Amino acid sequence: MILDALIALMASSFTLVLDLIPSWTPPTEAFSQSSASVGSMASAGNGYFPVRVLGICLALVLGLKVALLAWRGVVFVYSVLPLKAT
């Protein structure tokens, strides 16, 4: 009971402090404008180097890294499992 009261007191004081912080959201108009400028720069650079190919290469490398990490996980689980003695 005492522990419950202490936890409730700490939780309510934490909530009280967090309620003092004002809620704020960034303006979304600035982000849409900057994303449009990044898109226009990428389309301008597409004549020099195909940006689509760069995205595909990055996705392939990331996929390979994930596959290798999964393989290491499988090998780790296999090495930890105890072997049955026959």
Image: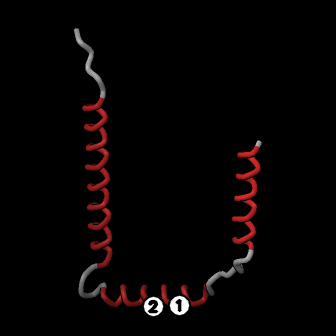
Q: Identify whether 5 is placed above or below 38.
A: above
Q: In the image, what residue occupies the spot 53% across and 90% down?
A: 33
Classify mark 2: helix, strand or loop.
helix
* Residue under the image location 70 percent in, 71 percent down: 18
What type is the residue that disc 2 sits on? Ser
| Residue 70 x, y percent position in the rendering | 31, 45
In the rendered structure, are the residues bearing label 2 and label 1 in contact, judged by CB atoms less than 8 Å apart?
Answer: yes
20 left or right of 70? right
**Badge 1: few (under 14), some or many (20 or more) residues near its Cα, within 10 Å?**
few
Question: Which of 17 and 56 lies nearest the eye of the viewer?
Answer: 17
Residue type, numbered disc 1? Gln
Q: x%, y% of residue 82? A: 29, 23
Report which residue position mark 2 lands on: 37
The residue positioned farthest toward the front in the image shown: 2
Name the residue located 22 percent from the left edge and 8 percent from the top edge: 86
Closer to us: 85 or 28: 85
Q: Residue 33 carries which label?
A: 1
Question: Where does the image place residue 42, in percent across and percent down from the top left?
Answer: 36, 85
Q: Residue at x 24, y 87 (%)?
A: 48
**Furthest residue to the top?**
86
The colouring scheme, among rainbow, by chain, secondary structure or one colour, is secondary structure
Is the residue marked by circle 2 packed among few (<14), some (14-19), or many (20+) residues within 10 Å? few
Which quarter shows the N terminus?
A: top right
- CA separation, marks 2 and 1? 6 Å
Q: Is 12 drawn above or below residue 1 in the view shown? A: below
**In the figure, residue 38 lies in which quadrant?**
bottom left
The answer to which image quadrant residue 9 occupies is bottom right
Horizontal side, residue 29 vs residue 58: left or right: right
